[in-house]
Image (cartoon, rainbow, N blue to C red):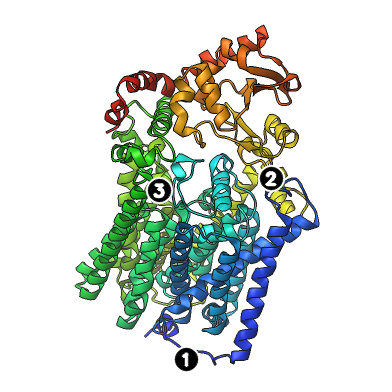
């Protein structure tokens, strides 16, 4: 038995702590959680402290860093419910943490469904998890013992990995997002859910109508603040880095240096750094797939190990369906690969386990889709054309409108066509097979396949056929992703974001291929911690990824400014500057708190600003009256806006060519007669015009200025050929038919 397998043998558990010692640790952890909660709540950096710097911001940043570390302990503590004694300590930590994440997802969803997502309840749940971690096995025992048993160069590699992980958290996870999507809908949506304390359908964002994220994400939001939701994404990436480390250690024959380099490459890979998904459900979906790949070889250790991991993986695939049912087809594709390798090796228990997990994943997805449809009138948003055909108008129109979703879909179709997506929106296109995936994704699939073949046919294969056990499910899910992303248009769904696992598991493919090449070249069967040709080759391939990742981050936003924010020298607003719009910034500080404003142009720098509520033109609580707002008379539209407490509209002259100028400006209320009759107008900083419905002299002059009317007329005409202008014109005949026949819309999108 080689050195690696000996290291895998379970060692006797460490001496159990005394009850007093466990109680002291539990009290310390719970006190730390209380301090985090008190710090974040009292400073309120996301709202009242948006523009502040200094000591308060430093305390806030350290509180969120501490919260991330505590969440790791919470997941592991919750995972102590599983009987994992048959696993090696390191594997106990991985399986327990992923299993704990699954349980907390279920708990958060249950509380959200019951309308109980409040700070005090979230605190009790997370405090109970911390206490479980303290009173059960030492929660870091698996990692600490693993590092202590290694030689000096392996410990040095671990130290480097920890440094990169901290840099990753401080520079990438904690600062505000780098995507306009963060500010246009994710932050405002989570803020709305946080204020309401439940998971009822969102009136803010039609594509975020339900669970989006996970139960644990909403627990974090309830306890801390909106920006802290990103901690969950960071948590999942760190857990997946440990998982990738374990897989690569196995594939390299126990070389911990190679494994550490692979984990470092994951944490600094450009695609992971720039994914912009720390507050989305896509990381949770990819975490499920990555764990299935890990499970495929971890269960092969022994029958007892397979039994120990069975319940955690069943709960995890169920939690994946709760996070988003879109994750389930990818999970089932990976499980099909696991079933294939079990069938090829005549592994009856393995085949039975793979089919059982797949059945549970499928059943969970069906239950979630049915529950969502009963609650909202629509199964999901991806892919939208298919989902819209199966809608229930009664339930759907209770919180939004079919017309709103149709308008959004047609605008995206217009955008896709205008940007070279082809007129076959929703159809098959050979050009889309390669464009969305990119050469990198194709290379990943080819790399994995070559590694599997080389290692399978090697005269010196790795122990237990682990390479094929890891790479077969990976190639299977890659093939499925290849087909799915080719058939479904990018602007019709977010399927591409659900395939982040192809980048997360890329280091494992590289390690597998390099190990095979090195073994062929050196004709050596040595392995272990000592550096050798494999280590050098891996470093040559993986280290540049680390440099590229942080260099690319520096190019986009700058490493030092983000570090300066952590040090308290730059405010959240300063980090927000890339998307900051002068007109919205001016209004957020001058209008009364709580005022509702509709920018009729698309500007990411508006929607997440504090004090004033900036609405997106296509995603807001007015969508139930969208037919009136777009096609009604000026009197009807004015009355509808008053009902929704909306009196302020911003027209950004310099943004008149923006493809996403919203359709409200095309309504009768904004025609010349409506402007003269209902509005006061004034110019505000940033080259914008503020129109105030039913305004007084303090709100500006009557909107009958010839130059003003000419500018608005020009914008209206130009935007008729752009996304939402096209959608409005396209839907206009349909709405006219709806006046005579209410079922016209139903027939149009079935």
Quarter occupied by the N terminus: bottom left
Residue that protrudes farthest toward the top in the picture: 706
Residue at (58, 28) in percent of width and height: 642
> Which mark is first along the chain, 3 or 1?
1
Q: Do the residues labelled 1 and 3 touch (CB within 8 Å)?
A: no
Give the labeled residue for mark 3: 441
Residue 139, image x, y percentages: 54, 79
Tell me where residue 709 appears, x and y as whole percent: 62, 10
Q: Can residue 661 be seen in this view?
A: no
Helix, strand or loop at mark 1: loop
Rounded to the nearest angstrom, the CA distance separating label 3 from label 2 is 31 Å
> Which image quarter: residue 42?
bottom right
10 Å crowding of disc 3: few (<14), some (14-19), many (20+): many
**Distance Cα–Cα, label 1 vs label 2:** 50 Å
Q: Looking at the picture, tell me which residue is in the foreground, 234 or 256.
A: 234
Residues tagged 1 and 2 counted as in contact (Cβ below 8 A): no
| Residue matched to label 1 | 12
Which of the two discs, 3 and 2, labels the residue nearer the N terminus? 3
Q: Do the residues labelled 3 and 2 touch (CB within 8 Å)?
A: no
Q: According to the image, label 2 marks what residue?
A: 575
> Is residue 143 something that shows in the picture?
yes
The nearer-to-camera label among 1 and 2 is 2
Q: Distance between the residues labelled 1 and 3?
A: 43 Å
Q: Position of residue 108 (x, y in %)?
A: 48, 62
Relative to 410, say whether 185 is above or below: below
Q: Position of residue 262 (x, y in %)?
A: 50, 63
* Towards the viewer: 270 or 608: 608
Q: Residues within 10 Å of mark 1 (few under 14, many from 20)?
A: few
Horizontal arrangement in the rendering, residue 553 relative to residue 387 (left or right): right
Q: Is mark 2 on a helix, strand or loop?
A: helix
Q: In this view, does 320 lie above or below 581?
A: below
What residue is at 24 percent from the left and 66 percent from the top?
Answer: 355
């Amino acid at each position: 038995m080689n050195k690696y397998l000996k290291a895998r043998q379970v060692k006797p558990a460490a001496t159990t702590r005394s009850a007093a010692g466990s109680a002291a640790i539990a009290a310390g952890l719970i006190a730390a959680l209380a301090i985090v909660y008190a710090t974040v709540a009292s400073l309120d950096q996301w709202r009242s402290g948006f523009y502040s710097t200094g000591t308060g911001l430093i305390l806030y940043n350290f509180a969120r860093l501490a919260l991330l570390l505590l969440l790791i302990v919470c997941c592991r503590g919750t995972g102590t419910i599983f009987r994992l004694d048959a696993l090696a300590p390191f594997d106990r930590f991985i399986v327990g943490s992923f299993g704990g994440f699954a349980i907390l997802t279920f708990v958060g969803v249950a509380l959200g469904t019951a309308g109980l997502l409040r700070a005090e309840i979230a605190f009790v749940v997370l405090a109970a998890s911390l206490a479980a971690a303290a009173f059960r096995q030492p929660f870091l025992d698996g990692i600490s013992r693993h590092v202590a048993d290694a030689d000096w160069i392996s410990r040095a590699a671990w130290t480097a990995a920890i440094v990169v992980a901290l840099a990753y958290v401080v520079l990438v996870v904690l600062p505000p997002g780098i995507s306009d999507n963060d500010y246009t809908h994710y932050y405002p949506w989570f803020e709305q859910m946080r204020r309401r304390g439940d998971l009822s359908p969102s009136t803010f964002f039609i594509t975020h109508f339900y669970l989006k994220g996970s139960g644990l994400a909403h627990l974090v939001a309830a306890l801390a603040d909106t920006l802290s939701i990103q901690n969950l994404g960071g948590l999942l990436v760190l857990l997946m880095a440990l998982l990738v480390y374990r897989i690569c250690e196995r594939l390299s024959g126990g070389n911990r240096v190679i494994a550490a380099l692979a984990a470092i490459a994951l944490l600094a890979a450009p695609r992971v750094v720039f994914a912009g998904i720390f507050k989305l459900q896509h990381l949770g979906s990819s975490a499920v797939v990555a764990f299935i790949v890990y499970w495929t070889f971890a269960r092969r250790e022994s029958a007892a190990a397979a039994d120990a991991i069975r319940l955690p993986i069943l709960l995890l695939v169920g939690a994946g369906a709760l996070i988003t049912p879109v994750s389930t087809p990818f999970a089932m594709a990976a499980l099909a690969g696991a079933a294939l390798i079990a069938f090829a090796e005549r592994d009856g228990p393995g085949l039975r386990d793979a089919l059982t997990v797949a059945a549970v994943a499928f059943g969970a997805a069906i239950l979630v889709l049915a529950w969502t449809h009963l609650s909202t009138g629509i199964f999901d948003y991806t892919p939208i054309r298919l989902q819209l055909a199966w809608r229930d108008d009664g339930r759907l129109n209770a919180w939004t409108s079919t017309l709103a979703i149709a308008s959004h879909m047609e605008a995206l179709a217009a955008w896709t066509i205008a940007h070279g997506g082809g007129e076959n929106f929703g159809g098959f296109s050979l050009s889309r097979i390669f464009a969305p995936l990119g050469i990198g994704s194709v290379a990943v699939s080819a790399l994995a396949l070559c590694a599997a073949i080389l290692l399978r046919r090697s005269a010196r294969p790795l122990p237990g056929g682990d390479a094929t056990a890891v790479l077969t499910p990976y190639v299977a899910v890659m093939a499925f992703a290849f087909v799915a992303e080719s058939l479904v248009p990018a602007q019709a769904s977010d399927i591409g974001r659900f395939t982040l696992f192809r980048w997360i598991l890329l280091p494992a493919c590289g390690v597998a291929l390099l190990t095979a090449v090195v073994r062929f070249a050196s004709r050596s069967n040595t392995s272990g911690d000592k550096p050798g040709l494999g280590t050098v080759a891996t470093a040559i391939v993986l280290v540049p990824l680390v440099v590229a990742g942080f260099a690319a981050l520096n190019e986009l936003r700058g490493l030092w400014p983000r570090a300066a924010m952590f040090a308290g020298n730059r405010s959240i607003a300063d980090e927000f500057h890339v998307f900051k719009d002068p007109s919205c910034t001016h209004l957020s500080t001058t209008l009364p708190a709580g005022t509702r404003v509709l920018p009729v142009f698309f500007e990411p720098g508006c929607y997440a600003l504090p004090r004033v509520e900036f609405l997106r033109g296509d995603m807001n609580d007015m969508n139930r009256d969208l037919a009136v707002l777009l096609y009604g008379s000026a009197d009807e539209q004015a009355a509808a806006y008053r009902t929704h407490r909306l009196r302020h509209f911003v027209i950004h002259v310099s943004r008149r060519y923006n493809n996403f100028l919203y359709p409200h400006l095309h309504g009768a209320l904004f025609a010349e007669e409506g402007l003269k009759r209902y509005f006061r107008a004034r110019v505000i900083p940033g080259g914008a015009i503020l129109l105030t419905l039913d305004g007084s002299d303090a709100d500006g002059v009557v909107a009958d200025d010839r130059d003003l009317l000419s500018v608005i007329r020009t914008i209206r005409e130009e935007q008729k050929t752009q996304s939402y202008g096209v959608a409005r014109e396209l839907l206009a005949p349909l709405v006219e038919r709806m006046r005579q026949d209410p079922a016209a819309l139903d027939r149009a999108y079935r």
